[in-house]
Image: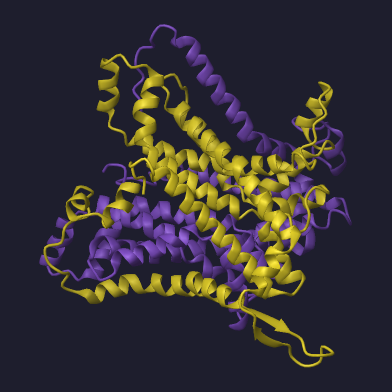
Chain colours: A purple, B yellow
Amino acid sequence: MVTRSVQRPGGLAGGILVNATLVLAAAYFLLPIVWVLIAATKSPGDLYSTFGLWFSDSPQAWENLVDLFTQDGGAFSIWILNSVLYSGGGALVATIIATAAGYAFAKYAFRAKETLFWTILGGVLVPATVIALPLYFLLNAAGLTGSYWSVLLPSMVSPFGVYLARIHANASVPDEVVEAARIDGAGDLRIFGSIASRMMTPAIVTIFLFQFVTIWNNYLLPLVMLNDPKRFPITLGLTLWNSQTQRDPMFTQLVVTGSAVSVVLLVVLMVSLQRFWKADLTAGATKG
Amino acid sequence: MTAVTAAPRSDAPAAATLGEPIRRRPPRRPGALWVLLTPFLVMFAAFFIAPIVFAIIDSLFSQKSSGLGLGAPTREFVFLDNYAAALSNPSFVASLWRLVAFSAIEVPLMVVTALGLALLLGAAAARFPRAFRITYFMPYGVPGVIASLLWGFLYIPATSPVLQLLDAMGIDANPLSSDAVLFAIANIALWGFAGYNMLILIAALDSIPEELYEAAKLDGAGEWRMIWHIKLPLIRPSIVLVTLFTIIGTLQLFVEPLVLRPLTTAISSDFTPNLAAYNQAFAQGNPNLAAAMAVIVALLAFAFSALFLRIVNRKGNRAW
């Protein structure tokens, strides 16, 4: 953080300019969110006939929510649960195995270590689409497409998580601690499980959150893998409804309200866990 | 970030300064190493390496149906025929160029915005930087599909307060016209990811030692000179990283045009190479051609990344 020192002469105009720009940028980033939250309170007719950034005279937020959660036999709640399952389960396993691997890269010397690490990091650069299509045919051969596993398993791999874990293990787990624990007779796995992992907790939370949001936001993988709406995550479910708006305009309001609910869910998650998001992605690296 | 990633390749003393310890003796229990490492390696091999290898192999084959279409189609090795077919397909080539144009719009827009926001939030005059930071970052939690749905509503006059206001001022804007649609898509991506990239840059800015600013202040440097001579050079590796991620991200363009497509005639079913590949695989039933198209996108991503890293590393100050 830059210290707030005394403003130099002429800094006032600059200060106003800086803060005005910040406010404008905030308006830009909030615009779609504010729009959808307001739109979610309107009747399908008012959605088109009233000004988008203000409430209509006859708000019906509750009716919209009831419609949302009862449409198609409560499909929306199932989609939320599916999203939570895919994101939570996938991110949990991804975090555990990525942290273990990152720690191994940080604390052990072995043959071809850097080649292996760079191959994994190269995985970050491979466009997801290039993986998703062939993965469908591979999992199809294994009879897994259409199942929960077809989305969960690929979501459990986070090359970026390995990278973050390696950096943070370097930065926050001193070798002396590992050595001392070894001298005390602790096995290496216990050192990782009960000492190092505790020291790496902030990094572990960060890895989990990033993977959670990555899976939550992923569209292509479930799109390719799933065909039964019962197993859809929210993203896929909402586009399913969106594709029906031509046939029945009622679906537009469902899509709007559903979008609003899912935006609120994630915004609450992000704001409440704010301190872990700033957990510097690059900590320990730029301190070279 | 780059310091660490670059260091392991350089000599040992450099590595030591980064906290990657020089090991005096080999670990005593290599068994533990493999317990830690194997789960990830197995998953990585199964869900990253295998699909890529599969795509490459698949792209060299073709399904030939026999005579009257009776019996199972046979699989034939056709070497690069699928690539030739893809690259001689005018609409696929057009989609590749469209992608290049989109990158040319999106990458500078993204990097400049993220950098501008990070520097503004670090300015001494900025009020409530924490609140603004989380506000800018919030859209990262909104899936691209939903972001596209929302902006879709904001791009059509019937529901868009912005277009209605512009219309009231006599400005007739149509973000979904064929001239503007790439910008409309770029805007969705910018909205979703600028805050995330800003966060990476803020982390880099925060790690600049305070003494550097104080020294510069003593020398009479103003805020602009500090940005130009201290902040930008020191966070250069993170700027490179953000640029690289954005390049990779833009080449994956898929969701936004897919969602906006029903709203406009300016987006075709093979608007981007990924859409074309998806259509080939699932609508046209030609997975081999789809694999070739996917591999072409991957090669493009690697070529762009390599080219970009080459350019930024040319002046001798290596970033990676």
What x and y, as percent, mark residue B228? 39, 26
Nearest the viewer among A257 and A211 is A211
Number of dots carrying numbers: 0
What x and y, as percent, mark residue A220? 63, 62
Query: In which image quadrant can residue B203 be found?
Result: top left
- At 13% from the left and 70% from the top, the residue drawn is A185
- At 47% from the left and 66% from the top, the residue drawn is A157
> With B144 as the anchor, is A166 left or right in this view?
left
- At 73% from the left and 71% from the top, the residue drawn is B282
> Can you see residue A4?
yes
Query: In which image quadrant can residue B92 be found?
Result: bottom right
Nearest the viewer among B164 and A46 is B164
- At 47% from the left and 22% from the top, the residue drawn is B127
> With B13 as the anchor, is B214 left or right in this view?
right
Name the residue furthest top. Answer: A9
Q: Is residue A188 above or below residue A91?
A: below
Nearest the viewer among B275 and B64 is B64
Q: Quadrant of the N terminus of chain A?
A: top left
> Can you see residue A225?
no
Q: Quadrant of the C terminus of chain A?
A: top left
Query: In which image quadrant can residue A5 be found?
Result: top left
What x and y, as percent, mark residue B181? 74, 42
What x and y, as percent, mark residue B312? 42, 43
